[in-house]
Image: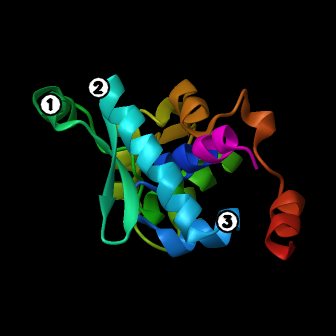
């Protein structure tokens, strides 16, 4: 692998990791000597420092991590206080999957599938604009019908709902 390719792969790994990536883990992935990893990482650290961008690479506990530049901490704090966390809990993901595949669907149907109360998960998904109220079901109490939004498609990188994996595709991926 060329030096430029190694740097690009390392950047991608650090970006995706979101936490300290140990030298031994990098060695296992790239299959290059630790000494070479350290040289390339020092070059990357220097390049980022010289560019003085919003991101930096730092060495921490025999590993490396991509972090934000402390010089821009004021704006990062503002951003964090104005945006909801983008991570979803397991119950929220479970609920979202049910809505995505069964929409339009009412809360009682979601809870029947999950076997637990789903109020909190539905509220979280609605606040994050991943689901919307599509109308009301013609049934006693006229419960809300839920479906996914355009933000849902963006969050998961889908063009449309037809790109959702089928059960057969998911089983094949797990078997591989």
Relative placement, left or right, of 146 versus 124 is right
What is the distance, in whole Å, between disc 2 and disc 3 at their CAs? 29 Å
Give coordinates of residue 50: x percent, y percent: 33, 28
Please determine whether, in this image, residue 158 is positioned above or below residue 139. above
Which residues are drawn in magenta?
A: 1-8
- The residue at which mark 3 appears reads as 32
Decide whether the magenta segment is chiefly helix, strand or loop.
Answer: helix
Relative placement, left or right, of 114 versus 172 is left
Give coordinates of residue 12: x percent, y percent: 57, 45
C-beta proximity under 8 Å, tags 2 and 3? no
Please determine whether, in this image, residue 97 is positioned above or below residue 144. below
In the rendered image, residue 112 lying in the magenta stretch gets the answer: no
Q: Which residue is drawn at the image coordinates 63% and 69% (left, top)?
A: 33
The numbered dot on residue 52 is 2
Instruction: Rate crowding at label 1 as few (under 14), some (14 to 19) or many (20 or more) other CA atoms within 10 Å.
Output: few
Give coordinates of residue 10: x percent, y percent: 56, 50
In this rendering, which labeled residue sits more in front, label 3 or label 1? Answer: 3
What is the distance, in whole Å, between disc 2 and disc 1 at their CAs? 9 Å
């Amino acid at each position: 692998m060329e030096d430029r390719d190694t740097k690009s792969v390392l950047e991608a790994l650090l970006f995706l990791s979101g936490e300290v990536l140990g030298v031994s883990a990098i060695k296992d992935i790239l299959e290059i000597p630790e000494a070479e990893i350290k040289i390339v990482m020092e070059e990357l650290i220097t390049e980022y420092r010289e560019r003085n961008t919003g991101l930096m690479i730092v060495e921490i506990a025999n590993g490396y991590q991509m972090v934000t530049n402390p010089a821009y901490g004021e704006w990062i704090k503002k951003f964090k206080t104005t945006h909801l966390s983008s991570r979803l809990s397991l119950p929220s993901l479970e609920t979202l999957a049910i809505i995505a595949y069964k929409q339009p669907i009412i809360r009682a149907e979601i809870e029947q599938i999950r076997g637990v109360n789903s109020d909190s998960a539905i509220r979280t998904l609605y606040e994050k604009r991943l689901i919307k109220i599509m109308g009301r079901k013609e049934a006693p109490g006229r419960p809300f019908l839920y479906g996914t939004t355009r933000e849902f498609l963006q969050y998961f990188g889908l063009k449309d709902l037809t790109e959702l994996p089928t059960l057969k595709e998911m089983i094949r991926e797990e078997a591989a």
